[in-house]
Image (cartoon, helix red, strand yellow):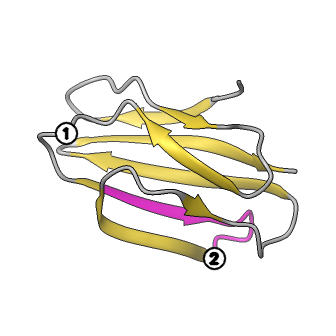
Amino acid sequence: MYSKTVYVSGLGILDLSLVPNPGTGSFRIIGLPSDIQSSVSIYSTMGQTLYSTDSYTSELINLENHAKGFYLVRILVGNTEQSIRYINE
């Protein structure tokens, strides 16, 4: 499992993973606290927003219709932000 954290900011440390990573277009975020609202945004390498929600729980995120390559998954939990690179194979 590859879950390279690119960036973390805020008051706490998140222990989050994208599963599976690398993957074939669908993944879940593992390790989110259930008692705090989580926001998720996914960006292409060109900076285009491909997915965004202010109330992510644990649903499957689908990037199967997007090109193979790297994507940046930005996760905000309370005041803590973590960005993880996702590899779409």
Q: Residue at x 18, y 52 (%)?
A: 37
Q: Residue at x 23, y 34 (%)?
A: 33
Q: Residue at x 61, y 65 (%)?
A: 43
Q: Quadrant of the N terminus?
A: top right
Image mark count: 2
Q: Where is 87 relative to 31, above or below? A: below
Q: Secondary structure at mark 2?
A: loop
Q: Quadrant of residue 77?
A: top left
Compared across the picture, whether 83 is left or right of 31 comes to right
Q: Magenta stretch: residue 43 in it?
A: yes
Q: Earlier in the sequence, mark 2 or mark 1?
A: 1
Q: Quadrant of residue 20?
A: top right
Disc 2 versus disc 1: nearer the observer: 1
Compared across the picture, whether 58 is left or right of 55 comes to right
Q: Secondary structure at mark 1?
A: loop
Amino acid at circle 2: Gln
Amino acid at circle 1: Ser
Q: Which residue is mark 1?
A: 34
Q: Which residue is mark 2?
A: 48
Residue 41, percent across and down?
Answer: 46, 63
Compared across the picture, whether 41 is left or right of 18 comes to left
Of 26 and 4, the residue lying toward us: 26
Circles 2 and 1: CB atoms closer than 8 Å: no
Q: Quadrant of residue 15?
A: top left
Q: Residue at x 38, y 49 (%)?
A: 58
Residue 79, percent across and down?
Answer: 19, 43
Q: Magenta stretch: residue 80 in it?
A: no
Residue 72, percent across and down?
Answer: 62, 53
Crowdedness of circle 1 by 10 Å Cα count: few (<14), some, many (20+)? few
**Magenta-highlighted residues:** 39-47
